[in-house]
Amino acid sequence: MQLDPKKLTPMPGYVLVEPAQKTTQTSGGIYLPDNAGDKPQAGTVLAIGDTWHTEAGATIKSPVKVGDQVVYKKWGGNDVKMGTVEYQFLKFEDILATIN
């Protein structure tokens, strides 16, 4: 089965993020492959799950909207590879900031 990120709706409390393309160039002008170094910690929100209702009864709405550029925790989320891209499913709490 081929997954299409445009057809996915995250579960409540989660967002789907497409990581920013990583372009690394050394001071000497050499481009490094994507697997060299750390993964990106920024990307674009593609889809948002419903409002999250905690066990304590609190209601937590998404802190972002579709199209927002975000920075997220280094070790947060779950990778899902679709085609050649590794998308991230992140909890609302894994998002650290929006990029203006």
Image: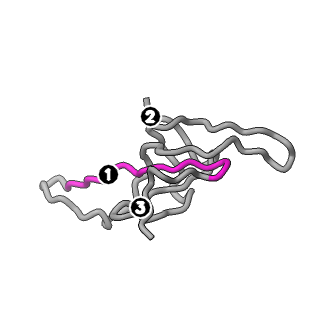
| Residue 39, above or below 100 | below
Q: Which residue is the site of mark 2?
A: 99
Seen in the image, is 17 located left or right of residue 30?
right
Is residue 19 highlighted in magenta? Answer: yes
Q: Is residue 80 left or right of residue 77?
A: left
Mark 2 or 3 closer to N-term? 3
Which amino acid does the dot numbered 3 rest on? Glu
Q: Is residue 67 magenta?
A: no
Q: Earlier in the sequence, mark 1 or mark 3?
A: 1
**Colour convention:** one colour
Residue 95, image quadrant: top right
Pointer 1 and pointer 3: residues touching (CB < 8 Å)? no
Report the disc number at residue 86. Answer: 3
- Amino acid type, callout 2: Ile
**Residue 78 - label:** none
Pick the residue in front: 67 or 39: 67
Q: Identify the residue shown where x is 49% and y is 63%.
A: 79
| SS label for mark 2 | loop
Residues at discs 2 and 1 in contact (Cβ within 8 Å): no
Residue span colored magenta:
11-25
Q: Locate residue 86, reporting x and y percent.
A: 41, 61
Q: Which mark is residue 21?
A: 1
Amino acid at circle 1: Gln
Tag 2 near tag 3, CB within 8 Å: no
Residue 67, image x, y percentages: 44, 37
Q: CA distance from mark 2 to mark 1?
A: 15 Å
Foreground residue, 22 or 87? Answer: 87
